[in-house]
Amino acid sequence: MERTPIHRLREFIGQKVTVQGWLQTLRDQKKMQFLIIRDRTGLVQVAFWKANDPALAERISTLGTESAVTITGTVIDNEIVKLNGLEIQLESLEIVNAAEAPVPFEPFGDSLPSIDFRLDWRYLDLRRAENLLLFTVQTTVEQAMREYWLQHDFMEIHSPKIMGTPSESGAELFEVAYFERKAYLAQSPQFYKQMAMAAGFERVFEIGPVFRADPSFTSRHMTEFTGVDMEMSWIDSHEDVMAFTERWIQYVYQVVKDKHGDEIREKLGVEIKVPTVPFPRISMHDAYVVLKQVGYALPPEKKGDLDPGGERAMADYVKKTYDHDFFFLIDWPITVRPFYHMRHADRPDLTKSFDLIAGGLEIATGAQREHRPDILLQQAFEKGLHQEPIQFYLDFFRYGCPSHGGFGLGLSRFMMVMLGINNIRETVYIFRGPTRLNP
Amino acid sequence: MERTPIHRLREFIGQKVTVQGWLQTLRDQKKMQFLIIRDRTGLVQVAFWKANDPALAERISTLGTESAVTITGTVIDNEIVKLNGLEIQLESLEIVNAAEAPVPFEPFGDSLPSIDFRLDWRYLDLRRAENLLLFTVQTTVEQAMREYWLQHDFMEIHSPKIMGTPSESGAELFEVAYFERKAYLAQSPQFYKQMAMAAGFERVFEIGPVFRADPSFTSRHMTEFTGVDMEMSWIDSHEDVMAFTERWIQYVYQVVKDKHGDEIREKLGVEIKVPTVPFPRISMHDAYVVLKQVGYALPPEKKGDLDPGGERAMADYVKKTYDHDFFFLIDWPITVRPFYHMRHADRPDLTKSFDLIAGGLEIATGAQREHRPDILLQQAFEKGLHQEPIQFYLDFFRYGCPSHGGFGLGLSRFMMVMLGINNIRETVYIFRGPTRLNP
């Protein structure tokens, strides 16, 4: 018999249905048993008169919560039932996969164990309604991102994650044993999305894994995360990239609000607010002035850069001054930016780059790239890089590479900000950190 | 001035426009220069009277082909011009990035160098019209795949590519130096998409990189490729997976035919033929009977399996018998399938699995998975696996995991078949093989 999703049961009042899902709770009374069954679409109460089949009643009473079951029964309109005013009168039950008892933790229990324990049993943790919603919304987010890109003539690429040479500075790089030699995991699709510009693809995007051998244990860092990258050709400056980015984000927020706004408010207490464009742009120079004014003291080692506290202080200022949750921090000093960021012609100490700060968190970094090979090589030397490991990259600019720029955004950070979640470990399907490779 | 894409120039007859692209050819005559400029949307002829600006004429005459340029001029309707009957009368030209001369090879030349040489200069190779079309079609393919999944309530996941233990057999595995310990690159999202079933996500998909330390140098193998994976819960058998898969493929073909059918016929000489459903299903047992009939001798070491020649022989048989380009080879012996494939209850020597053969090439493998933990463990033992490295995976089945199955498909193989391309190195953005990590 075909499976009926729980949210459609009301269409089947008086009819026999098959429902498949998880036993969320069991109330075992003297004459009756009440099971709450959950599938991805909702919950339903199932009632069983023990006298109808004492052997089945016996099996049900020993059934562990979270077991996977297939039940068949008749849908009854019953206004006494709190759960949507209907119940299923059970006729048969098949145990598809019995849960051992007790479960490591009850995903629908009154209190939750630590995040670390929940990550050990991530699949139980993902059964919680908040998590199902999070990954449902993330699915919508990614599709909306792609829709907007495709509406604007972007092509999708999949760049290689195994690289033959250490890119960029060589720091935070994972080494791979590649047959008889060494290889490295890509820290970003940066070089290869720029190659697409040299290939004449003009506009590309990629959503895929990036790897950082970063030993930090903060609530914002992971050693592997999903990067959301784009690159576009024939731009005049980083302003073109920002102008695209803010409209793209506005579109994604609008789609999410339309599709999930009510459920997000209900289950997470968060109001999805579609940002207005343009987002405020604040130069790093002005940010330093503001931070001084508001009395925020940056740690001295952060010269030219911002620390997370500085980002939050700036976000507070932007919220107060412009009533905006997003802003671009622009024109970063060359000292804190990679060699391939283009520099202002009239201010060679400043890059044509930006960070996108959302809800006080840096979620994206972008720039116009230097596409003139002689200047690019010189900037690499200035950063102390050797030519040989990046020669394959420098070669991209030798035979007609247009001006271009783009950004890289962290998907899980985007979800943190959108849904108001404080720890990135809660927003990623499976977390990877310096000491966590499990499950 | 805003950029006008070349395919829209006819809307601007008599007007001044800016076009940005690559210098494909230059005819330098006594009084005039004719430039063919290319962008992603087409080609246009640009005419320049040298007398108008001899200095500019001089710069143009030394300009290497494939240079990236911005030109401004007036669009003229001119029926003498073979290229769409229009040309631009050049007023100004800016060299955005001059190509060194000579280029390693002319992407639009009369003959092409070897695939290996072209891979060294992949970005020049990607400029060819066939390649631009290939990756444009691939973009459509992926979006159509996702559309169909989303229409059928699938969620998108991004599973980790770094794993703490060697999965499956441990063969063909890349090792990663992960801080103070060893880790491994995922050979497929298999275990983690199954985890999503245990998490109650019910239906998931993922398009992402998979890694195989496979030393082969065939035209079908890569050490890194884009895997297209799905997994669905509450199935009765592998038939449910196949029934979904064939409709999903039919949808993708239909979208591609509608959107790019004419251009594919024109540029590649390939007719996109939307397959009818159901695809033929042939058991491995019957395939062996057929191969014997047609006189195809399998190499003895391939017992229970098929070799590429056998796949092609079967494809010929299916084409003749059913007039179909796709077929499912089903019910493979357990000897050639991994431990997690479910077995037929009445034929414990056969798995509930399939390969999808398209155009004589295996493009996908799927199965119903074994979701009963005791049987799963026993099957792992039979395959000689140790429990400890796969314990994290076995744990997924302890607390209520529904029945489920899915498939993994190779994106570049799919593109080979769809567009009639013989070498996978031609269909992947950047090829990775045992001896190729460049660019």
Image: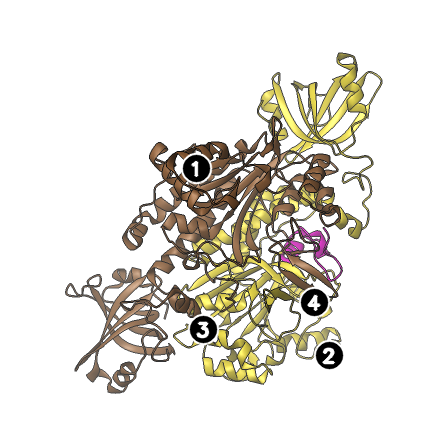
Chain colours: A yellow, B brown
Is disc 3 surrounded by few (<14), some (14 to 19) or many (20+) residues within 10 Å?
many
Query: Element type at marker 4?
Result: loop
Amino acid type at circle 2 is Glu
In magenta, the rendered stretch is A412-439
**Residue on which disc 1 sits:** B327
The alpha-carbon separation of the residues under discs 1 and 2 comes to 63 Å
Residue A365 in magenta? Answer: no
Query: Element type at marker 3?
Result: helix
- Which chain does the numbered disc 2 sit on? A
**Residue on which disc 3 sits:** A396
**Residue on which disc 2 sits:** A301
Prevailing SS of the magenta stretch: loop
Q: Are marks 1 and 2 in contact (CB under 8 Å)?
A: no
Q: Position of residue B211 (x, y in %)?
A: 57, 56
**Residue on which disc 4 sits:** A214
- Which chain does the numbered disc 3 sit on? A
Is circle 3 on the same chain as circle 4? Answer: yes
